[in-house]
Amino acid sequence: MECFIRTVDIVLLKEKTKFSEKEIRQWHAGFLHDCPTGKLNKKQLINVYRRFYPQGNVEPFCKYLFAAVDTNRDGKIDFVEYLSQIAAISHSDLNKRLSAAFDLYDISGDGQIDRKELTMLISALYELLGENDRKGNRDPKSRANEIIARLDKNGDKKLNKEEFIAGCQNDSVLRRVLAPTV
């Protein structure tokens, strides 16, 4: 069981996240409270999200979130991966936060979000929020088509990171839909 954080990790996290040593230690204590082994597996992430979204089905969203945060692909989220993601979505400038959102949505990791990826993620967000009204323009596929049509500047029917960030910067409604923590 990991009950301390290594000095080298504190130095790395201070540089990467801009959190103070005290803040890092506080986050670490909270992380260990939820994950006494010092590693968060997919099932534990789902259980954490269920506390925040009891009305929704958190599993589809957690699947994508877990894949994005588990950067070393070992099937577990360690504290460094966890706090790096927290910092990316809560603490950095708008471009970095939108970049983190894009990375979550780019399921294939090819540097682009296509309609299928966006449709799956919109569906996962609806599930997370317990949103059942999916008729007309609220249909995930229709919503994905509308978003891509609005943000796709080069006409390839996909969104690259630059298009995504620029589109969300210029449209507060899309920013709330696509990057709700931003």
Image (cartoon, rainbow, N blue to C red):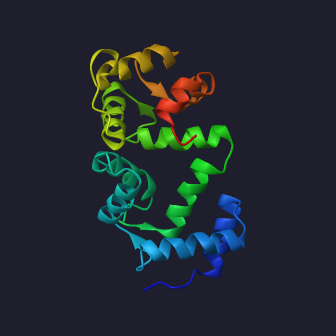
Q: Where is residue 17 in the image (x, y as percent from the top left)?
A: 66, 59
Residue lying at 37% horizontally and 38% vertically, measured from the top left = 125
Q: Where is residue 147 in the image (x, y as percent from the top left)?
A: 44, 20
Image quarter (top left, top right, bottom left or bottom right) of the C terminus = top right
Can the viewer see residue 156 in this picture?
Answer: no
Image quarter (top left, top right, bottom left or bottom right) of the N terminus = bottom left
Residue lying at 64% horizontally and 37% vertically, measured from the top left = 95
Find residue 86 and report its image quarter.
bottom right
Task: Tally the marks.
Answer: 0
On screen, 96 above or below 21?
Answer: above
Q: Where is residue 59 in the image (x, y as percent from the top left)?
A: 28, 50
Q: In this view, does 94 lie to the left or right of 157?
A: right
Q: Position of residue 30 (x, y in %)?
A: 52, 72
Residue lying at 61% horizontally and 50% vertically, measured from the top left = 90
Question: Can you name the residue that lies furthest to the front here?
Answer: 55
Residue lying at 37% horizontally and 27% vertically, measured from the top left = 114
Q: In this view, does 32 lie to the left or right of 171?
A: left
Can the viewer see residue 69 in this picture?
Answer: yes
Q: In this view, does 51 lie to the left or right of 101?
A: left
